Amino acid sequence: MATYDYQVTIESSLTSEHQRFMSEAIAEARKSADAGGVPLGCVLVKEGRIIGRGHNRRIQDSDPIMHAEIAALRDALRQGDLDACRGATLYCTGMSCDMCAAANVYWGVKEVVLARLDGYKNNRPLYEANGVRVIEVDLDEPKRLLKQFNETHP
């Protein structure tokens, strides 16, 4: 197994644009929570416009790969343009799992803004090795939603 030496930079403040799109990702996480699912949400943004939205639907759809990031990528790609995600920025209320990080790299996402969740895998090295810029942010709402979910789904 490869080991990586990297420094995690956690942004304490977001630009107004990052705040706006992270708020949209949090709204997606709430949709999943309201439906009894894992409260993770995501939006894909290109040229200042949301091109894909998704929230974790693993429980709701009995589909183990329907993570928030996969759902947002599918939403963007449904328009028929296979380059739709190339150069996009992804905003997600959690850390990327291996599958989601690989999918983001494959479809050409250039930047990810992730809410930091302690205890979850950090795929920053995979992203950076593939030229993807990573911004980690410390936000209370994603942590609160996940804590609430974990308390009701032991």
Image: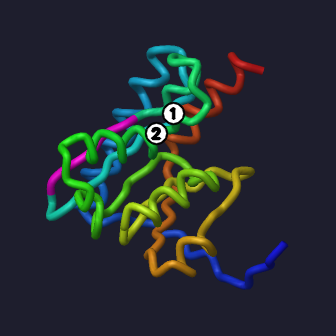
- Above or below, 113 relative to 64: below
Question: Does the magenta segment cover residue 146?
Answer: no
Q: Which residue is mark 1?
A: 66
- Above or below, 51 relative to 62: below
Q: Give the mark count.
A: 2
Give percent across and percent down for residue 22. Answer: 34, 50
**Image point 62% across, 24% down: which residue?**
149
**Image point 36% across, 71% down: which residue?**
110
Q: Which residue is mark 2?
A: 68
Give percent across and percent down for residue 125. Answer: 63, 75
- Amino acid found under the numbered disc labelled 2: Ala
Which of these two is toward me, 65 or 9? Answer: 65
User: Considering the numbered disc 1 on the image, is that residue within a helix, a strand or a loop?
Assistant: loop
Q: CA distance from mark 2 to mark 1?
A: 7 Å
Give percent across and percent down for residue 12. Answer: 47, 66
- Above or below, 75 relative to 139: above
- The label on residue 37 is none
Q: Residues within 10 Å of mark 1 (few under 14, many from 20)?
A: many
Q: Which residues are magenta?
A: 49-54
